[in-house]
Image (tube, rainbow, N blue to C red):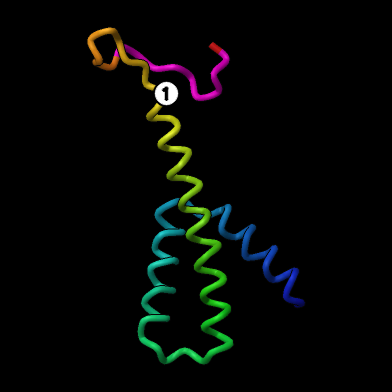
């Protein structure tokens, strides 16, 4: 398996993970790297995987924030309803 195909496979694997699964995988990588007993080449691979997981988690958090921001506030500043995320209405 070459490096480009490996990276594409890993990215596909991440997109199939739930937020919680991706976060657990990221935490496991951080723990391994913090121990300091991982060989350099493996550390680099783990770091790259961790960055992919971090980006996926951030993307999901951003999407959740966008959904929350779609809550419409009334004149009194209190939530008055919601607007669909897709904005068609």
For the image, the number of numbered tags is 1
Residue drawn at (76%, 77%) of the image: 2
Task: Locate residue 24: give its quadrant.
Answer: bottom left
Residue drawn at (46%, 53%) of the image: 57
Residue 84, horizontal then vertical, whole percent: 48, 19
- The answer to whether residue 86 is magenta is yes
Give the answer, above or below, for where 60 lies relative to 67: below
Q: Residue furthest top?
A: 75
* Residues rendered magenta in the picture: 80-88
- The answer to whether residue 19 is magenta is no
Residue 79, horizontal then vertical, whole percent: 28, 17
58 or 17: nearer the eye? Answer: 58
Give the answer, above or below, for where 86 lies relative to 8: above
36 or 27: nearer the eye? Answer: 36
Q: Is residue 72 left or right of residue 12?
A: left
Residue 40, horizontal then vertical, whole percent: 54, 89
Residue 14, horizontal then vertical, whole percent: 56, 58
Which image quarter holds the N terminus?
bottom right
Q: Which residue is mark 1?
A: 70
Q: Is residue 3 left or right of residue 66?
A: right
14 or 64: nearer the eye? Answer: 64
Residue drawn at (51%, 83%) of the image: 43
Give the answer, above or below, for where 42 lies relative to 73: below
Q: Main secondary structure of the magenta part?
A: loop
The secondary element bearing badge 1 is classed as loop
Residue drawn at (43%, 45%) of the image: 61
**10 Å crowding of disc 1: few (<14), some (14-19), many (20+):** some
């Amino acid at each position: 398996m070459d490096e480009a195909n490996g990276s594409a496979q890993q990215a596909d694997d991440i997109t199939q993970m739930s937020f919680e699964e991706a976060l657990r995988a990221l935490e496991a990588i951080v723990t391994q790297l913090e121990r300091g007993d991982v060989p350099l080449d493996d550390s680099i691979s783990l770091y790259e995987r961790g960055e992919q997981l971090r980006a996926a988690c951030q993307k999901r958090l951003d999407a959740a924030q966008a959904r929350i921001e779609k809550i419409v506030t009334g004149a009194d500043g209190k939530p008055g309803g919601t607007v669909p995320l897709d904005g068609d209405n």
